[in-house]
Amino acid sequence: MNLIVRRALALFIDAAIVGMLLSPAAFLISYFSLESSGGVFFTLVGAMMFIFKDFYSSDGSVGKKYSGIKLSFNASLDKGETNYCRLIRNLPLFLWPLEGLIAVVNNGKRLGDILGKSKVTLKSLQMD
């Protein structure tokens, strides 16, 4: 499986996790009509979960972990700069048509990777 397919799989897994986490609460709010602006609230919460998805581990999101890819940054960056780059790299995801086009044309490298000075690579298989 090539890097572009693995990245798409990772994005799908991350989106599914966000959906599964938000669905029960969204259902309860809509069922009991507890809040008229529940849709706006859950959209904002989902967006925040997506922006911060790469803070799960040093290798990136849960989707990246299970699709066999990892996120890395320039070794010269300190922890604060790395966290800033993790945040910046996910902001362009909301322009997903543009991100997808750039990734296909640019050999799997997204606009977010360029802005966040990050690199997504295949995980090396290690034998224990």
Image (cartoon, rainbow, N blue to C red):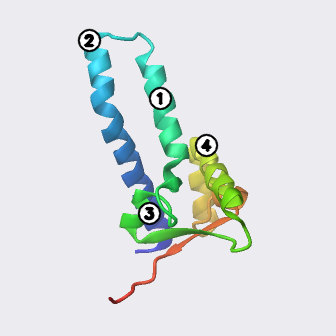
Q: Nearer the viewer, mark 2 or mark 4?
A: 2
Q: Point out residue 103 in the picture as x, y percentages from the top left corner.
A: 59, 61
**Residue that appears at 45% across and 14% down:** 37
Reading the image, the residue beneath label 4 is 95
Quadrant of residue 116 within the rendered picture: bottom right
The answer to the question of whether label 3 and label 2 lie on touching residues, with beta carbons closer than 8 A, is: no
Specify which label sits upstream in the sequence, 4 or 1.
1
Q: Which residue is mark 3?
A: 64
Which is in the foreground here, disc 1 or disc 2?
2
Between the C-alphas of marks 4 and 3, the distance is 20 Å
Mark 1 to mark 2 CA distance (whole Å): 18 Å
Q: Earlier in the sequence, mark 4 or mark 3?
A: 3
Question: Mark 1 vs mark 2: which is more N-terminal?
Answer: 2
**Alpha-carbon neighbours of circle 1 within 10 Å: few (<14), some, or many (≥20)?**
few
In the rendered image, the vertical position of residue 15 relative to residue 69, given as above or below? above
Three-letter code for the amino acid on which mark 1 is drawn: Thr
Quick one: 111 or 120, which is closer to the camera?
Answer: 120
Callout 1 secondary element: helix
x, y percent for residue 60: 50, 61
